[in-house]
Amino acid sequence: MEMRMDWDADGALRLALQGRLDLETVPDIRKRVLKALKKKPSAQVAVDLSGIERMDTAGVAFLVELRNLVGGKAGDWRLEKASGAVMKMLELARLDVLADAGADHGRD
Amino acid sequence: MEGLLLDVLSGLGRWTLGHVRGTGRAGIFLMHGVRGVFRKPKKFRAILGHVHFIGTKSFFVIGFTAAFTGMVLGLQGYYTLSKFGSEGLLGAAVALSLIRELGPVLSALMVTGRAGSAICAEIGIMRIEEQIDALECMAIDPHAYLIAPRFVASLVAMPLLTAFFDVVGIAGGYLVGVSLLGVNPGAYLDGMQKSVEWLDVYMGLVKSFIFAMLFIWICTYKGYFAGVDRGSFGPEDVGRATTDAVVVSSVAILVSDYVVTSLLL
Amino acid sequence: MAETEAGAIIQVKSLNSFYGQRRVLQDISFEVPAGKVTVIMGVSGCGKSTLLRHLIGLKPTDPGQIFVEGRDLAGFDARQMEAFRKRIGVLFQAGALFNSMSVRDNIAVPLRVHTRLAEPTISIMVRIKLHQVGLTRFGDYMPSQLSGGMRKRAGLARALAMDPEMLFVDEPSSGLDPITAAGLDDLILELREAMGMTLIVVTHELESAFRIADQLIVLDQGRVLAAGMPESIRESRDERVVQFLTRRADERTRDQEGYLSDLLTGGRKVGVHP
Ligand SMILES: Nc1ncnc2c1ncn2[C@@H]1O[C@H](COP(=O)(O)OP(=O)(O)OP(=O)(O)O)[C@@H](O)[C@H]1O
Ligand SMILES: [Mg+2]
């Protein structure tokens, strides 16, 4: 599992995840993100999901939790570039409305 | 006639085999439970919960039993000792009987009746409702998850309850002996202090550990295998297991009490 | 031995099962294709739950009768069994919820034991599962405060907690109204779609069976009466299959003499005799 964290000029956190986001990888990823946010608090987060090969409910739950970690308003939390498989998992969790699908819908 | 003889013999054989098998299974069960203490999952919170159930919730019963046991010891002791004109030894007599014998035994019997039966029924219900099967299907070892925490909790709670029993019992003896019958308070306490030795306390402690292990082993075992031998899993199997558990535990406590006493003397 | 056919994750080869002397399953053979829904049907008491117990390794099986990915289930040691069981989820016929803890804690049990996930993450996962089975507001309830159908769904949520590869469910929709039952059917199909889950579903409901099944197995008195794609079952000419599908009750006791003698002698235990 790879993860990149960048901060925009206006302090928004950009998270790019790669590989598996599941039961086994989520605990470490969560720890790292928490630590980074503690060092450099950010009120906005955007997650780039395009690199995710496999995601399970733990992954979905982590993405949801992120929203809480940055303050918790709808506009401050964005899921971007969800692939088909990832979208299906979000659908299964009834959260598909929250994510932007596919690379062409991306906003960067 | 021959048929009858054969019937009796085969019945006897089946009975023996059944008991041998049962004993072997109980031994393996104990081993798995003890091994489970050192295995996943973490069980600190579960142990706390069971200590609360076995220990804290038994306080009232134990206190009550202890008070009256101590009081009766005070009465009887006074009656006997006064025949020899040695009422002053009352404190020693009460304390020694409680610490060496009655404290551990009665605490264990009361805990068996109060908590042991409930534990057996709880685990028995988990058996008949397939909850234990469900645990196995989650790759969770029921011995480590269900049984081991109860083993540890019992070993923690029983000595404490026994100590509590001893203290309350001695106070009960004091109440009757000193306050009602007029034994000299100094003599009561002083005699106690002089006569009770480390070996007595040690014996009581060893007993309470052994009883704790025995009762929790038997009660969890009976619940765990409720109905398994008959291949039927109904409420009546839990009832039967619970009755068995209490009877067998009580007998085991009394028998082992004799054995331990004779070994430690 | 036992080379896996392409796609079969579980193979059952002439499985026999006994309770004591009585044989309840006889010569059962079929395969469970990976990533598909296999539905097991049959009248009450025909041995469906017993078959499930064999598949999940709860009832001991003789060697050479059940294979998981080509390996004999009977030969699994403790570690292999644990590995297998981490990959499966099971819903028992009666739910088998732990009645000493809330629904929420029930679902969290496998997560707390097997993963290092933080408690906030777990609690979100639990809510997602509850939502999937339509029990959003019932996390804090104790199992004894739920209805039978709700207990079933809570059990399903628990079976799904670890996102298992294989899911075994024993009559998920018994005791449910048609609408909730249809919701569960949808969920089953979604799980197959989204996660490629392999599902083995026991059910009585014909309609639901035909909706979700990729493969149908009809049991009758401990034997496989028919097995195959739903269409082929529907077109079957077999008398017993037709009877089962058209829900005709067993014919009035044809054997009047035998019935009479049963009435008089108290009868004997029924079943497939060895
Ligand atoms: N513990 C047991 N001991 C003895 N016989 C059993 C036991 N469990 C089940 N049986 C017998 O095995 C047969 C099959 O039972 P099983 O529970 O597998 O049926 P089923 O198909 O699941 O029925 P249902 O649809 O009613 O749940 C029944 O005839 C039953 O009498
Ligand atoms: Mg059944």
Image (tube, rainbow, N blue to C red):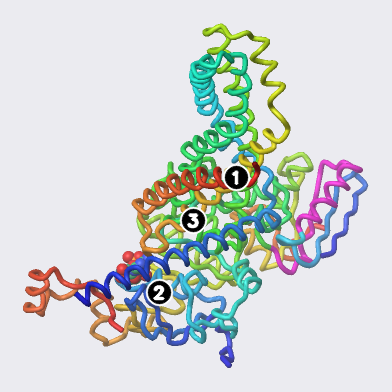
User: Residue type at mark 3?
Assistant: Tyr
User: Residue type at mark 1?
Assistant: Ser
- Which region is colored magenta? A26-55
Secondary structure at numbered mark 1: helix
From the image, tell me which residue sits under label 3: B224
Residue at 57% x, 23% y is B169
From the image, tell me which residue sits under label 1: B262
Secondary structure at numbered mark 2: strand
Is B55 in the magenta? no
From the image, tell me which residue sits under label 2: C40
Is the residue B67 above or below the residue B259 in the image?
Answer: above
Between the residue at mark 3 and the residue at mark 1, the CA separation in whole angstroms equals 33 Å
Judge left or right: residue B255 versus residue B90.
left
Image coordinates for residue C170, horizontal then vertical, percent:
43, 65
Image quadrant where residue B261 sits: top right
The numbered mark 3 sits on a residue in which chain?
A: B
